[in-house]
Image: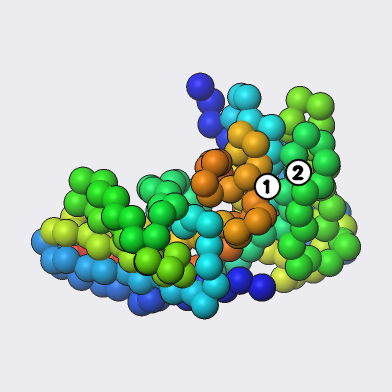
Amino acid sequence: TQLLEQSPQFLSIQEGENLTVYCNSSSVFSSLQWYRQEPGEGPVLLVTVVTGGEVKKLKRLTFQFGDARKDSSLHITAAQTGDTGLYLCAGAETSGSRLTFGEGTQLTVNP
Amino acid sequence: DAGVTQSPTHLIKTRGQHVTLRCSPISGHKSVSWYQQVLGQGPQFIFQYYEKEERGRGNFPDRFSARQFPNYSSELNVNALLLGDSALYLCASSLNGRAGRTDTQYFGPGTRLTVL
């Protein structure tokens, strides 16, 4: 069974600060997705990374896939209150189709 | 285009009852996956269906079953409900059911099931 560990589990910061969320595994994934989830809603896809070492930017969000495709990070620059939410990483198995999710990072950005 | 739709949005049942949850995928998508998300945790994979065939099953008891219809919509059935089945049940649709490199899973808003 492939497992994904996310850290930190909770993060509370002030508006304007930077932060990084980590997603680690001992297993190799064919790709890794990052989702953001609001309370009572389904996860919304932010990005998919598929190539080892890949870096993708989405405005103030920077996503990186580890060289060995076992880990990933999400960095947010100058956080805003609208960034508040649950951030989930999910890995796709090398030969399957199911997603394995991390436990999530609950981010709170305070004004 | 409409996204993934799920019904009902909320449901309250008592222990021992049966429940049916429904999902309609994005138009053109042929694969549907079901996930259970307990409060404070990440979603856990339950089932995936592609072209009406079960493609994968997670570590859930036989009380959980699902099926996919010719129009690619899907139902998740849970029998003999337990308190621990209380969760947000998420449906995700994808084009061809190969997550990651060639496919992306898009999630619906979920059905919040409460078992009393």
Look at mark 1 in the image and give the residue it sits on. B33
Choose between B112 and B24: the one closer to the eye. Answer: B24
Secondary element under disc 1, as helix, strand or loop, is strand
Residue B116 at least partly seen: no
User: Please, what is the three-letter code of the amino acid marked with disc 1?
Assistant: Ser
| Residue neighbourhood size for the residue with mark 2, other residues' Cα within 10 Å, grouped as few (<14), some (14–19), many (≥20) | many
Is residue B42 depicted above or below B74 in this figure?
Answer: below
Looking at this view, is B17 or A83 the one in front?
A83
Which residue, as the protein is rendered here, is positioned at the far top?
B1
Badge 1: chain ID: B
Q: Residues within 10 Å of mark 1 (few under 14, many from 20)?
A: many
- Residue located 37% across and 66% down the image: A66
User: Which residue occupies 81% across, 32% down?
Assistant: B69
Q: Which quarter of the figure has residue B64?
A: bottom right
Q: Chain of mark 2?
A: B
**Secondary structure type for disc 2:** strand
- The residue singled out by tag 2 in the image is B49
Q: Nearer the viewer, residue B112 or A42?
A: A42
